[in-house]
Image: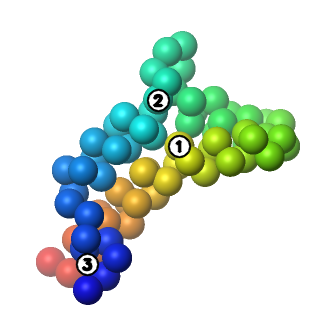
Amino acid sequence: MSFLDQFPLPLLILAALTLGLAPFFPEPHIWEKLRMLVAGTLVRPIDIFDLLLHAAPWLLLLAKLIRVATTA
Protein backbone atom coordinates (compact mmCIF):
# COMPACT_ATOMS: atom_id res chain seq x y z
CA MET A 1 0.00 0.00 0.00
CA SER A 2 1.29 3.41 -0.92
CA PHE A 3 2.05 6.11 1.62
CA LEU A 4 -0.56 8.34 -0.07
CA ASP A 5 -3.30 5.72 0.23
CA GLN A 6 -3.23 6.14 4.01
CA PHE A 7 -4.44 9.75 3.80
CA PRO A 8 -8.13 10.42 3.15
CA LEU A 9 -8.68 12.96 0.37
CA PRO A 10 -10.96 15.24 2.46
CA LEU A 11 -8.26 15.48 5.14
CA LEU A 12 -5.67 16.58 2.58
CA ILE A 13 -8.07 19.15 1.13
CA LEU A 14 -8.75 20.53 4.61
CA ALA A 15 -5.02 20.65 5.40
CA ALA A 16 -4.23 22.47 2.16
CA LEU A 17 -6.96 25.05 2.71
CA THR A 18 -6.12 25.71 6.35
CA LEU A 19 -2.44 24.97 7.02
CA GLY A 20 -1.42 25.67 3.45
CA LEU A 21 -2.99 29.13 3.37
CA ALA A 22 -2.60 30.27 6.98
CA PRO A 23 -2.43 33.07 7.99
CA PHE A 24 -5.18 34.28 5.71
CA PHE A 25 -4.80 38.04 6.17
CA PRO A 26 -3.36 40.26 4.77
CA GLU A 27 -2.40 37.55 2.23
CA PRO A 28 -1.81 33.81 2.39
CA HIS A 29 1.66 33.09 3.71
CA ILE A 30 2.53 30.67 0.93
CA TRP A 31 1.71 33.35 -1.63
CA GLU A 32 4.13 35.74 0.10
CA LYS A 33 6.88 33.10 0.14
CA LEU A 34 6.31 32.20 -3.52
CA ARG A 35 6.60 35.88 -4.46
CA MET A 36 9.85 36.06 -2.50
CA LEU A 37 11.10 32.96 -4.32
CA VAL A 38 10.36 34.47 -7.73
CA ALA A 39 11.90 37.81 -6.73
CA GLY A 40 15.03 36.07 -5.46
CA THR A 41 14.65 37.35 -1.90
CA LEU A 42 13.92 33.97 -0.31
CA VAL A 43 17.37 33.54 1.22
CA ARG A 44 16.91 33.25 4.99
CA PRO A 45 16.71 29.64 6.23
CA ILE A 46 13.58 30.41 8.26
CA ASP A 47 11.80 31.65 5.13
CA ILE A 48 12.80 28.54 3.16
CA PHE A 49 11.62 26.31 6.02
CA ASP A 50 8.38 28.28 6.20
CA LEU A 51 7.79 27.82 2.46
CA LEU A 52 8.34 24.07 2.80
CA LEU A 53 5.90 23.83 5.70
CA HIS A 54 3.16 25.76 3.92
CA ALA A 55 3.74 23.94 0.63
CA ALA A 56 3.70 20.42 2.11
CA PRO A 57 -0.11 20.07 2.32
CA TRP A 58 -0.46 21.30 -1.27
CA LEU A 59 2.20 18.89 -2.53
CA LEU A 60 0.60 15.97 -0.70
CA LEU A 61 -2.80 16.89 -2.11
CA LEU A 62 -1.40 17.12 -5.63
CA ALA A 63 0.35 13.76 -5.28
CA LYS A 64 -2.84 12.17 -3.93
CA LEU A 65 -4.93 13.55 -6.80
CA ILE A 66 -2.42 12.23 -9.33
CA ARG A 67 -2.44 8.83 -7.59
CA VAL A 68 -6.25 8.70 -7.60
CA ALA A 69 -6.40 9.71 -11.27
CA THR A 70 -3.84 7.15 -12.38
CA THR A 71 -5.25 4.23 -10.39
CA ALA A 72 -8.89 4.81 -11.31
Which amino acid type is marked by label 3? Thr
Mark 3 near mark 2, Cβ–Cβ under 8 Å? no
**Dot 1 lies on which element?**
helix
Residue placed under numbered mark 3 in the picture: 70
Left or right of residue 5: residue 35: right
Residue placed under numbered mark 1 in the picture: 54
Camera sees residue 69: no
Residue 26 is situated, as x and y percent measured from the top left of the image, at 54, 13
The disc, 1 or 3, on the residue closer to the chain's N-terminal end is: 1
The disc, 3 or 2, on the residue closer to the chain's N-terminal end is: 2
Position above or below: 49 against 35:
below
Position above or below: 70 against 61:
below
Which amino acid type is marked by label 2? Ala
Residue placed under numbered mark 2 in the picture: 22
Q: Quadrant of residue 32?
A: top right
Q: Quadrant of the C terminus?
A: bottom left
Mark 2 near mark 1, Cβ–Cβ under 8 Å? yes
Q: Quadrant of residue 35?
A: top right
Which amino acid type is marked by label 1? His
Q: Marks 1 and 3, Cα distance to the nearest angstrom? A: 26 Å
**Dot 2 lies on which element?**
loop
Query: What is the crowding at mark 2: few (fewer than 14 residues within 10 Å), some, or many (at least 20)?
Result: some
